[in-house]
Image (cartoon, rainbow, N blue to C red):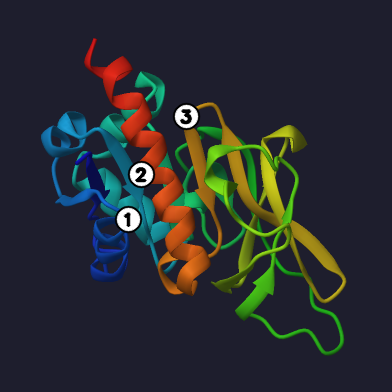
């Protein structure tokens, strides 16, 4: 079974993510140090909470460098929720610079009549990169579970893999670029379709293992 490092930087409960990966056929390894991340076959960067503390916690554990190295190395990499947002240059939520892996900014939903922020609950995805491995064996417009007040706004629209519409605002719900994928929603809370997404990620890791071991 592939080993997937789930980065632990004190920003959210890791149990449900690990359980989802294990149900999908992987060995989930909670990673608090660089060596565990470096040795893993793939990396999942979760996160719940605010932008600035997330970046501060990553830096305090000396994990910024190894996270960037994992992406550059070609390992399959999946960001979830806050783990998507901190890949960007910065956020309107805070002052800390992000990881700067994807050029762009994290923005807050605009106020509009009848709009609830945070965007919380089930909503449908619209795929903009429908052929990526993460979306295989899913319906055309799957329902997934969101909890967020901020969304990513990439400079290059081609990195968007899916969008979601909340009120009158259509925003980025997922990105994909080479081995890097990240989603704003919570697959571990998205029932059978979320498990399928995690299973798709595990399948991708399994296919990449021979190449990464050469």
On the rendered structure, is 70 left or right of 118? left
Disc 1 target residue: 24
Classify mark 3: residues with Cα within 10 Å, few (<14), some (14-19) or many (20+).
some
Q: Label 1, secondary structure: give it.
A: loop
Q: Quadrant of the C terminus?
A: top left
Point out the image quarter for the N terminus. Answer: top left
On the image, which quarter does residue 103 sit in?
top right
Cα separation, mark 2 vs mark 3, equals 13 Å
What residue appears at the point 57 percent right and 72 percent down from the top-left corner? 146
- Residue 123: mark in rendering: none
Q: Position of residue 42 (x, y in %)?
A: 30, 36
The circle drawn on residue 179 is 3
Instruction: Relative to 199, say whether 37 is above or below.
Output: above
Instruction: Tell me whether circle 3 and circle 1 mark residues in contact (CB < 8 Å).
Output: no
Q: Is residue 80 visible?
A: no
Which residue has dot 2 on it? 202
Q: Residue at x 38, y 40 (%)?
A: 203
Q: Earlier in the sequence, mark 2 or mark 1?
A: 1
Q: Are marks 2 and 1 in contact (CB under 8 Å)?
A: yes
Left or right: where 36 falls relative to 59: left
Residue in view at x 27 percent, y 54 percent: 57
User: On the picture, is 161 further left or further right than 25?
Assistant: right
Q: Can residue 5 be seen by looking at this rendering?
A: yes
Give the mark nearer the N terminus: 3 vs 1.
1
Work out whether mark 2 precedes mark 3 in sequence or the reverse, and give the earlier one: 3
Report crowding for label 2: few under 14, some 14 to 19, many 20 or more residues within 10 A (C-alpha). many
Q: Whole-percent x and y of residue 130?
A: 70, 43
How far across and how far down the image is residue 181, in percent? 51, 41
**Residue at position x 75%, y 58% in the image:** 171
Of circles 3 and 1, the one toward us is: 1
Q: Are marks 2 and 3 in contact (CB under 8 Å)?
A: no
């Amino acid at each position: 079974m592939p080993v997937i490092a789930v980065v632990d930087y004190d920003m959210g409960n890791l149990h449900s993510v690990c359980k989802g990966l294990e149900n999908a056929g992987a060995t989930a390894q909670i990673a608090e140090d660089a060596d565990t991340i470096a040795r893993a076959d793939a990396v999942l960067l979760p996160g719940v909470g605010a932008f600035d503390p997330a970046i501060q916690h990553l830096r305090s554990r000396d994990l910024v460098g190894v996270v960037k190295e994992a992406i550059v190395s070609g390992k399959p990499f999946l960001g979830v929720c806050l783990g998507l947002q901190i890949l960007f240059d910065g956020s309107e939520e805070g002052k800390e610079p992000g990881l700067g892996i994807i050029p762009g900014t994290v923005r807050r939903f605009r106020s509009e009549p009848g709009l609830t922020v945070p965007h919380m609950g089930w909503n449908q995805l619209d795929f903009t990169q429908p052929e990526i491995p993460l979306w295989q064996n899913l319906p055309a417009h799957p329902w997934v579970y969101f909890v967020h007040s901020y969304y990513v706004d990439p400079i290059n629209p081609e990195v968007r893999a899916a969008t979601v519409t909340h009120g009158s605002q259509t925003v980025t719900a997922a990105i994909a670029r080479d081995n890097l994928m990240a989603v704003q929603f919570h697959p571990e809370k998205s029932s059978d379709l979320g498990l399928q997404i995690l299973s798709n990620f595990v399948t991708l890791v399994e296919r990449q293992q021979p190449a990464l071991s050469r």
